[in-house]
Amino acid sequence: MELPISLRLSIRNVFRNRIRSFITLSAIAFGAISLIIAGGFFEDSFMQMREAYIHSYLGHIQVHKKGFSDKGSAKPFEYLIDEPNKIITLISSLDHVKIATPRISFSGLLSDGENTISVLCQGIAPKGEKALNIIDETKNENRGLGIQAGENLSEKDEFDLILGKGLSKAVESSIDNSLVLLSNTVDGALNAFDLNVKGIFFTASKEFDDRTIRVPISTAQKLLRTDKVQTLVVVLDKTKYTTQVKNNLLRLLKDNKIGLEVRTWDEMADFYNKTVELYGRQFFFLKLIISIIVVLSIFNTINMAIWERTREIGTIMALGFNRFDILKTFLLEGFILGTIGGIIGIIGGIIMAYLISIIGIPMPPPPGATVNWIAMIKIVPEILISAFIISTLSSLISSFYPAFKASRMVIADALRHI
Amino acid sequence: MDVVKTKNLNKDFFLGKTKIRALIDINISVEKGEFLAIAGPSGSGKTTLLNLIGCIDLPTSGIIRIDSIDTNRLSSNELANLRASKIGFIFQSFNLIPVFSALENVEYPLFKKKKNKKERKEIVMKALEDVGIEKFAKHKPDELSGGQRQRVAIARALVTNPKIILADEPTANLDQKTGATILDIMKKINEEHKTVFIFSTHDSKIMSMANRIIRIRDGAIISREV
């Protein structure tokens, strides 16, 4: 197959000054690699942060009694779910649901005899929470909720609790210490249990670790004098199915005439959403800066090429080619440079991302968190495509002015050019 | 019928605020089959006149008719089409496209003619044979001697079968012997195809071969010799 003459001319001109083309291609490829690495880093950070939030306590979906999200924090015991086991069975029948686990949260006072501190108490089902805490989607060994000392709660535990890392420091408590948990029952009476410290946990959220204790849900129900639960936390096999499962669950609840509200993790993870927005904005500016670098480098290359080839442009126009033909030739050169640079950039970016991810980048705890983590570079098709589009589009845009200038040359003047 | 006709043709340039009159009231007529030399010292305006006839520059005033078409009335694109169909150029420095082979250089103007690949190939090979350079068809310009390059340039000018070929000092960069050979080729084409050749030159060999000489000095015609 024969290539169109303008394309043949542009391709050959691109490789005419090899050193200059090499430098330009390097700049474009460097830009694309930077985008892929930065974008992949942000994506991996977002993914790890998201999964940490989901698997430490949010779950993928939470189910509450209707009205809980508006008024539940003021009157938590007025929004308890009746017959939780029946609903758990219903939820578990849905595709992609790994487990649905009950929780009941309430505030209480925790005392070691000398100090008393206000705490957020979560009654949890140890088996369900253990399933929640396993993160399938990240390569990091960290689990959503890790145990720093002692052991996590198990099915057979009754009057045991685990403490958040920050809280354990505040009450100066260690494993096997006995603490008193005082709370109101659902009817408003006071009730207290002696509980044994079985373990100290940490999660991605420092705020959570600073004020939370966990007890077996049966213990919490006894303390509160109820057999109801407040929350059903749904864990899925993959985070990407969240919306699909939410819709199916809403349909299922409607069909069974059960009035519950369903919220996904992203509706609850305000900090995560704001972080993503903040870093997303930063990434946008990074893209802009890289695009400007690419634009300037291509602009310089095409401008130089036009200056060097002024007489040639005059000759081509003298042969009967019009201004549009000249414009097309130089735009094509810019496009070819951008395309080749973009392809090299994508290949280089994938290799770099792979190599960096083998080693990993040790990172300090993010704001509001307590644990170090290992960042990797996630290869995301959307970022690869956007890096390629930015490379080619920037090249095309930056070629336009020099190409336009070339197409407006007076032929006789161009032919006189030395 | 005149293939080229100019009437009261003037061209001014500005050097800062100083007006330079490059051509003053040029009136010429060129008929089919002419081998015309425009002679004059450097800076006399002969290349400017050639540029105006070749529609690659615009006159300040006056009329140019190419094959009875008034070029003043044509748009930039129409002028490009006129050049593509009726005018061939041969330059002093050959002006070949360095990234193309000799064959591609000659083939290039044919892309404006919408010929298919086979037709193009036939026409190009014939043009290369006419100038005796067919063996070097695959060579790039930097692999050819000056004389060979100018032969390629002649083939490129010839390939669209134009009515006029404008040659701006075509032998100036060639040695005497090569220059003579190139001129013989052009004369042969002129005689066989009745293609008009207009030279800007101060080469006496060209002037001796021309059937008419127009002498210019300071932008004005000072003599016409047959």
Image (tube, coloured by chain):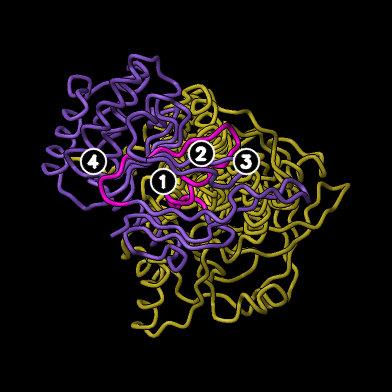
Q: Determine the colour of chain A.
A: yellow
B10 lies left or right of A253? right
Amino acid type, callout 4: Val
Q: Determine the colour of chain B.
A: purple
Amino acid type, callout 3: Leu
**Could one spot residue A133 in this view of the protein?**
no
Q: Residue at x 29, y 36 (%)?
A: B156
Q: CA distance from mark 1 to mark 3?
A: 31 Å
User: Closer to the camera, B42 or A84?
Assistant: B42
Residue B51 is a magenta residue: yes
Secondary element at tag 1: helix
A345 lies left or right of A293? left
Secondary element at tag 4: loop
Do callouts 1 and 3 mark residues in contact (Cβ within 8 Å)? Answer: no
Please tell me in which quadrant of the rendered image residue A257 appears: bottom left
Q: Residue at x 31, y 47 (%)?
A: B164
The residue where tag 4 is placed is B159
Disc assigned to residue A318: 1
User: Closer to the camera, A47 or A118?
Assistant: A47
Of the two numbered discs 1 and 2 on the same chain, state the one appearing first in sequence: 1
Judge the density around disc 1: few (<14), some (14-19), many (≥20) Cα neighbours within 10 Å: many
Q: CA distance from mark 1 to mark 4?
A: 14 Å
Count the numbered circles shown. 4
Discs 1 and 4 carry the same chain letter: no
Discs 2 and 4 carry the same chain letter: no
Secondary element at tag 3: helix
